[in-house]
Image (spheres, grey):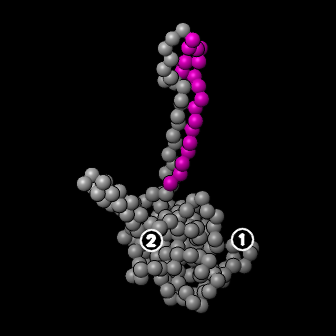
Amino acid sequence: MFRKLFLGLFIFFVVGCASIPDSLKTQTETPITDFATIVDDPAFVQHKEVRLGGIIASITNEKHRTRIEMASLPLTSDGRPKLDEKPQGRFVAYVDGFLEPLEYTQGRLLTVVGTLDGNEKGKVGEFGYTFPVVTVSGSQIWQIKQEIRIDNFDAYHSCIGTRCSFMNYGFGSTRGEVKQRVTK
């Protein structure tokens, strides 16, 4: 009985942690998430649903829409960009209406869903580049949280007897670890 309850709770938390936010859900079960697929066969993926994400390179508010240029990163199963991966290329996302440039600023992490609608010629610096274009139907901006963990192993050692060294009491090896994770 206890094992079944434990297994049920474990599955509930694992499934709950890996779910896609409502803003990133698509109409198809398997949207295209691999940027390499888009670059390798652009004719095949035209007008199909995609879920792409990465780092905002630039944002421009036009008259009726906003243009976001992004450096694509691989995504986790719940749509978060993977921080430890290198960019795969660039794409342009068009969002209807106005987006606040202070919120969607250069360097922020963003995931978008929508349809792939052709290519756009442009430049990255002075280099000519062909950007795949995504017409956005939903998006999720992410934050990077840092967690710092410090372990001081010798601060509370217990030594009883005449052979203990009290000279080092409270001083010893300390290990620190900084982790970054992506959150809503």
On whether residue 172 falls in the magenta region, the answer is yes
Q: Is residue 64 above or below residue 156?
A: below
Residue 20 pos. (x, y %): 41, 68
Secondary structure under the numbered disc 2 in the rendered image: strand
Residue 64: x, y in percent?
47, 80
The residue drawn where x is 63% and y is 81% is: 39
Query: Which residue type does callout 1 highlight?
Result: Gly
Highlighted magenta segment, given as a residue range: 163-181
Q: Taking 120 as reference, is 143 left or right?
A: left
Point out residue 107 in the picture as x, y percentages from the top left corner: 58, 61
Could one spot residue 126 in this view of the protein? yes
Counting residues from the start of the chain, the first of labels 2 and 1 encountered is: 1
What secondary structure is marked by label 1? loop
Vertical placement of residue 1 versus 173, above or below: below
Mark 2 touching mark 1, by CB under 8 A?
no
**Circle 1 sits on which residue?**
125
Residue 59 visible here: no
